[in-house]
Image (cartoon, rainbow, N blue to C red):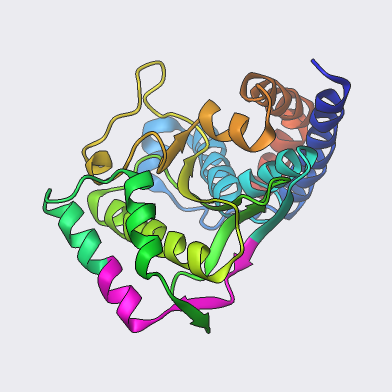
Amino acid sequence: MKKGNKDTLKIIEKKFNEALQIKISRYKRETKYMPFMDAILGKENTRLYSFGISMATWMGQSSNSGYETIAKILAESAGSKVYTQYEIPYTLTKETDSKIYDFYMSIRSGKMVPKSDQLQKEIKKFAQSVEGIDNDRIVDVFIIDKDNNHYFIDITSPKSNMKEASSLKLKLMRWTAIGLSGYKAKKVYAFVAFPYNPNHPKPYKRFSTDIFDENNDILIKKNFWNKISGFEVYDELIKIINKVGKKNIKAIKSKIEKLSMQ
């Protein structure tokens, strides 16, 4: 592994360790009364389960400690400009929005194939944006790489239901239109990122992916992390998180025990 890549992994380990320690120190159990879980798992296991749920939420939603921060470190190491919780300063014209929605409904009904390259060519013909506040203005991770390619990334749950998946598809199409018309990008990429594959070792496959171009709209596990970093990082990333977890497991157990006495 190249020295630069090793240095990046060291930065991730350091920052993730610091963030986890802050998370542990600030953790407060939302409810101490979970009689059904206590009856099934026992009080000690339920307390650990409660902390685990809090950790999963923290990893997925925190822009200062979880997946977004790791993505930022990796992309910056590849020479990209990276913004988390980025606010798009543009919105689409009514005419553009209307055409995008027509395309979206055609995909939903099966009349149109959801191939991202084909969609981009069509969208580019009519896409127009203006300065303003857009309903889909918040981008989890926005990247401008060294070649001036722009990436609009939504980090989401790998188990999205059909309603959630549909709204994500429309969002990606709208981001593509905004990216093509509002930015001077070499190329625009808008995709949903799943940090891991819940169906591992089997391939990820859910009915809701039918409206997506799975090779371009959805990046799962290695495809996501390796793409933004520019090197094979996923396996090393898991090792780092495991190392940090082991380093802090005593502090986690101690925190949970202290809270149970209060």
Place residue 158 in its image quadrant. Answer: top left
Left-right relation of 60 to 34: right
Specify whether residue 134 is in view: no
Q: Give the quadrant of the N terminus.
A: top right
x, y percentage for residue 167? 32, 60
x, y percentage for residue 226? 61, 29
Number of numbered markers: 0
Place residue 15 in its image quadrant. Answer: top right
Residue at image location 43% in from the left, 75% down from the top: 128
Choose between 72 and 197: the one closer to the eye: 72
Q: Give the quadrant of the C terminus.
A: bottom right
Which stretch is magenta?
85-100
x, y percentage for residue 249? 72, 29
Choose between 224 and 116: the one closer to the eye: 116
Residue at image location 47% in from the left, 77% down from the top: 129
Place residue 96 in its image quadrant. Answer: bottom left
Residue at image location 60% in from the left, 50% down from the top: 58
Specify whether residue 99 is in view: yes
x, y percentage for residue 261? 67, 48
Magenta highlight on residue 184: no
